[in-house]
Structure formats: C-alpha cells, structure tokens
Amino acid sequence: MTERRNKIDIIYDILRVTNDKGGKILPTHLLYKSNLSHQRMKGYVEELKQKRLIDEVKEDTKTFFVITDDGRKFLQQYHQLKEFTEAFGL
C-alpha cells in the first residue's frame, strides 16, 4: 500500500515539478505531474501564491506558474531536512 502524502510533501512536489521544468510550468502540466485533482491543485497554488513561493505570469495567451527565489529556498531547506531525518531512519 502506498503512503499518503501530507500537505508539506504536496507543496514540495508542486515546487519541485515547477523547478524541474526550468522554473515555470503550464497549469495542465502541473496538474498531471503533481497528481492532484484540479480543485486541490487550485487550492495549493493559491496558498503558494499568497506565501510568495510561486507567481502566476501570462505570456501571450498562456498562463504559467513560476517558482520564486523563496520557493527555491524552501526546496533546498526541505531537501536538507528530509536527508537529515532519513539519516536517522525517521
């Protein structure tokens, strides 16, 4: 059985996927890669925008989500925390 992701893991996944796509991603790509329903993704994206971890930008007729510097810092520090806890088997 797979383990359910908690909120922090979902936020990490959203930011990681965005970062891995060169720092910006189309909403539909984020939807598929984050493995969330449309409604849940929208809620997380709104929260991340409020916390300034991602921005929403429009280029021509397309909308993209772009990771911010604070979003990258979150990724780095979360990754360090995850490595630290795994080193102790937690």
Image: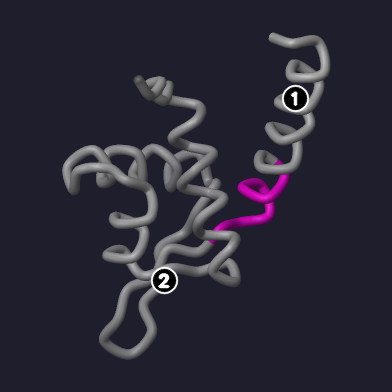
- Viewed as shown, does residue 21 lie left or right of 30? right
User: Percent from the top left, x then y, of residue 8?
Assistant: 50, 27
Q: Is residue 35 above or below residue 47?
A: below
Q: Name the image quarter holding the N terminus.
A: top left
Q: Which residues make up the magenta segment? A: 67-73
Q: Residue type at mark 1: give it.
A: Leu
Please tell me the numbered disc located at residue 81.
1
| Residue located farthest toward the front when viewing the structure as drawn | 1
60 or 8, nearer to the observer: 8
> Residue at image x 38%, y 84%?
59
Q: Residue at x 34, y 65 (%)?
A: 29
What amino acid is at disc 2?
Val
Please identify the quarter of the rendering in which residue 43 is found. top left
Q: Looking at the rendering, in which quadrant would you find the C terminus?
A: top right
Q: What colouring method underlies this structural image?
A: one colour
- Is residue 15 in the magenta section? no
Q: Which is nearer the N-term, disc 1 or disc 2?
A: 2
The kind of secondary structure element at disc 1 is: helix
Viewer-proximal residue, 72 or 88? 88
Number of the front mark, 1 or 2: 1
Q: Which residue is mark 2?
A: 57
Position of residue 89 in the picture relative to residue 46 (left or right): right
Q: Position of residue 48 (x, y in %)?
A: 45, 42
Q: Residues within 10 Å of mark 1 (few under 14, many from 20)?
A: few
Q: Nearer the viewer, residue 37 or 69?
A: 37
Measuring from the top left, give residue 66's x and y in whole percent: 50, 64
Up/down of 32 relative to 64, above or below:
above
